[in-house]
Image (tube, rainbow, N blue to C red):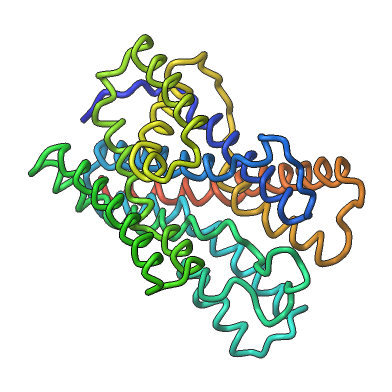
Amino acid sequence: MQKINIDNNFDVLRLILATLVYFAHWNVLTDQSVSYTVFHLSTYAVHMFFIVSGFLIFWSFDADQNKKHFYIKRFFRIFPLYAFLIILQTLFFIGFSDGNTFEIVKYFLVNVFFLNFLSPSVGTTLSSLEVNAINGSLWTLKNEVIFYLIVPLLFIFYKKFGKTIFLIFYILSVVYMFLIDYIATLEIVSRHHANILLFQFPAQVRLFMVGILLYILFDKFNKKNIYLLAIISLGLMVFLKDNTYFYYILYPLCVGFVMIFLVYFVKNIKVNFDFSYSLYILHFPVIQLALYFGINPTNPVVSFVVLFVVILILSYFSEKYIEKRFIRIGKEIVKKDKLK
């Protein structure tokens, strides 16, 4: 097992990333068109989330290579709050949608199994809003779940073939992205559908692989070289942000180097909470419901602050009374299983 310093800024970083996603989604959903950069960083935030997952989840499996224990802990970490939210969103559609019973049942079933793209809304309920979906943030969880499912297999490959296997998967992910672009130029699929495919798991594999590689190579980093890599990475991300070759091939590595620098090579900030998951999956429906019921403040500053405060409060209690309780249940089940 790799020796990793447990004093890190992962919790703070995830809270910052979830907040950046809120900034961007508020800007789009409320149709504000705020031009400040901080309101346009959601893509970077989501990509860094995937890299963080690659690092932490592989670390978690490396620490306890029991597949049963791994899946139990992942299930109780992710699914209870997610299922609770899907139930609440379904109840909203039961009460307010113009869809029929079949559409509502379909919405619940496909969403509870993370297939959100098959039914982002019901009927024309939200069609008058900027985005016709109750929770457009949930697409990332499908990618996360697929990654969780294959982590034990990836670990087997790692033990047999070494870290080169992750570089191979990285390259295959990049090839997939160029292939999708190519078939779009041939008009085999439309540009719109090609862009959708570029959000699917094969394209995100390269981000998860970066997280794993950073975990495996962690002892190679020191303050001097990671500082240099982070500075170079930021420069490339600014000057080559519109270059497709850079975005597909080198961009994930750049985001990864910045992530490692922020987590391990700046002053450690300790927090006793981490409601980033709650904040991430709750903020979108809160904004949408405020818009749907016409209770979003008309003043942009008031809207931004009020909605953010409401979301922070809901996220705090969500972590305290749902996330932590089910995480504890998962740990207790694993603990009892170890004692058998």
Which residue is depicted at the point 30% across and 36% down? 59
206 and 307: which is toward the camera? 206
Relative placement, left or right, of 65 versus 110 is left
Please tell me which residue lies in front, 318 or 310.
310
Judge from the rendering whether residue 127 lies leftward or rightward of residue 175; answer left or right: right
Q: Is residue 181 left or right of residue 90?
A: left
- Going 61% across and 70% down the picture, which residue do you hit? 87
Residue 275 quadrant: top right
Residue at the far top: name it: 224
Image quadrant assignment for residue 213: top left
Compared with 152, 270 (above or below) is: above
Picture coordinates of residue 31 (x, y %)? 78, 54
Spot the residue most to the right.
Answer: 298
Query: From the viewer's perspective, is 336 left or right of 19?
Result: left
**Residue 205 coordinates in the image, percent (x, y):** 33, 50
Does residue 255 show up?
A: yes
The total of numbered circles placed on residues is 0
Instruction: Return the x and y of residue 161 as percentages of the image width and height.
Output: 9, 42
Quadrant in which the N terminus appears: top left
Residue 7 visible in the displayed image: no
When the figure is inspected, residue 182 is found, relative to residue 279, above or below; the finding is below
Give the x, y percent position of residue 94: 71, 80
